[in-house]
Each structure stands twice: as structure tokens, then as C-alpha cells.
Image: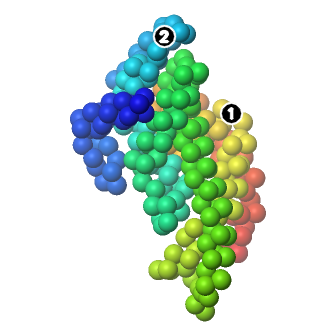
Amino acid sequence: MDTARARRSIKRAQEVFPRGPRGLYSCPVSDDRTTAAVQRYLDELAGVPGDAPAEPVVRELLAAATGRLHLICSSLLFRSYPRLTRGPLNLETEDLLDAVVARLIKAMRQVRPGNVRQFYALAGQHMRWELNDLARRLDEQAPAVGLRESMAGAPPDVGGSGDGDGSGASQPNPNTRRILDAIEQLPEAEREAFTLVRIQGMTQPEAATVIGVSAKTVQRRLNRGVILLAQQLADLRAAQRG
């Protein structure tokens, strides 16, 4: 019931903001009013007594953040998990957003972010958990599908280029997992700057507003993060050049 009500609140926000290319909302997600609205609901949420229902405030908070959450979901899905958008899963941004909304409603019964930075960090964490869960289930299904096909007698060209027949579309990508693991292992400040700018698609000034530092600080942290990742993943770059 809580998830359904939240989805209705988000649907109302979606009706206000028209869709752009690839389903992205054209609302001004970087506008200061969005950040102010999110913070206002977070402040209201902080004032809700522990024994009082917080879901109405959470629903309004999610509705206010819909544009930014949709953009982050789309960016993370298409940049880091593109294989989930293909068959057999065919995941769409709206599907991911629905799952993240359900996760956040449940999580925010116990966890109450104090500021915009903490809220988007929580949302990003649940996005990654949802995507990792989907990727793991997809990988677990792949051996079973291969076994059924071998027992049925697969055609001779199965396992070739993968173009057109989708044979390679659902195979796990260990390089992608290494990159994501390397990002998770960055120091907190560098990981936060890298995630906001390179994964969630924020500009450096937008990320600075969320974190509460200057844009120059974000730039320095981002540069340090890129250098650390280049060091950790040097063998992948060498393999690509070779």
C-alpha cells in the first residue's frame, strides 16, 4: 500500500514534467528549488516523532526528488549496467525507479537522512544494490539456460559473435565488476565526487552544492579519484591498447 501511494505521488510529479529523449525528464533537476524542497521535507521528516507515521512525508519527499532520481537511475543503468537493458531482462529506467522507491520507503522507516547529500547517497546505494541483485540473478540464470540449450541440441554457430541472436548479451562482464569494485574501494571523499559527477551525471558545481564544498574541491577530489582508478585498473588499459 505504501509503495502504491508513493508511485501515485511520483506519477503526479511526472505529469508536471514532460519527458525528453530516452525518457529523461526535462524538469530542472539542478535547480536550487529542487534541493531546497528536498531539504525542507528532510527537515520535516526529522521532526516526526518516532512512533508517528512518516510515510506521508517520505512520499512527498520522493515526489519532489523524482526528476533527479530518474536521471540518476537512467545514468547508472545505461552507463554501468547496459546489459540489463537488453533481453531477457529489458530493464527500463522506470522499472528501476519503481524498485528504488519501494526500497527507500522501507529503508526510511529506520534511516532518516539529515541533509540532501545523505539522501542522494542513500538513494544511490539502493540503486546499486537493486542493480547488483538483478545482475546476479541474471548471471545465475545464464548457466541454467546454457544447460537446457545443450540438452536440446544447440545449433553449431551458438556462441559465435553474439550479434543478432543475443547469445553473448547476458554473459557477465568481469571487467565491469572490477571497475565498480575499484570505485567502491576509493576513499570516501573521492568516491563521492566520482559517483556524483561521473556516474550520476551531475556537473561539478551541482555536486559541490550537494556535498557542501566548493567546485574546486570537487574537481580536486575527482582528479584524485581518477588517478587512483587509473592505477588500480592499469592492466585493463594495457589490455585494451594491446
Distance Cα–Cα, label 2 vs label 1: 34 Å
Which label's residue is closer to the chain start, 2 or 1? 2
User: On the picture, is 14 further left or further right than 68?
Assistant: left
Residue 47 in the image: state x and y as whole percent.
Answer: 48, 8
User: Does residue 223 appear to the left or right of 71 in the view shown?
Assistant: right
Q: Position of residue 225 (x, y in %)?
A: 66, 43
Residue at 69% across / 62% down in the picture?
Answer: 174
Residue 198 visible from this viewpoint: no
Give whichever of 27, 131 is nearer the camera. Answer: 131
Residue type, mark 1 in image: Glu
Q: Is residue 67 above or below residue 179?
A: above
**Residue at position x 65%, y 38% in the image:** 191
Q: Nearer the viewer, residue 159 or 70?
A: 159
Q: Is residue 94 above or below residue 81?
A: above
80 to 206, vertically: above or below = below
Instruction: Please name the amino acid that badge 2 sits on.
Output: Ala
Which structural element holds mark 1? helix
**Disc 1 marks which residue?**
188
- Residue 65 placement: quadrant: top left
Image-quadrant location for residue 190: top right
Check the picture and name the quadrant holding the N terminus. Answer: top left
Q: Nearer the viewer, mark 2 or mark 1?
A: 2
Q: Are marks 2 and 1 in contact (CB under 8 Å)?
A: no
Q: Are there few (<14), some (14-19), or many (20+) residues within 10 Å of tag 2? A: few
Question: Which residue is pictured at 59% across the width and 60% down the height?
Answer: 138
For mark 1, does the 10 Å Cα neighbourhood hold few (<14), some (14 to 19), or many (20 or more) residues? few
Residue under pointer 2:
52
Give the image location of residue 97, x and y in percent.
44, 42
Residue 152 as seen in the image, left or right of residue 64: right
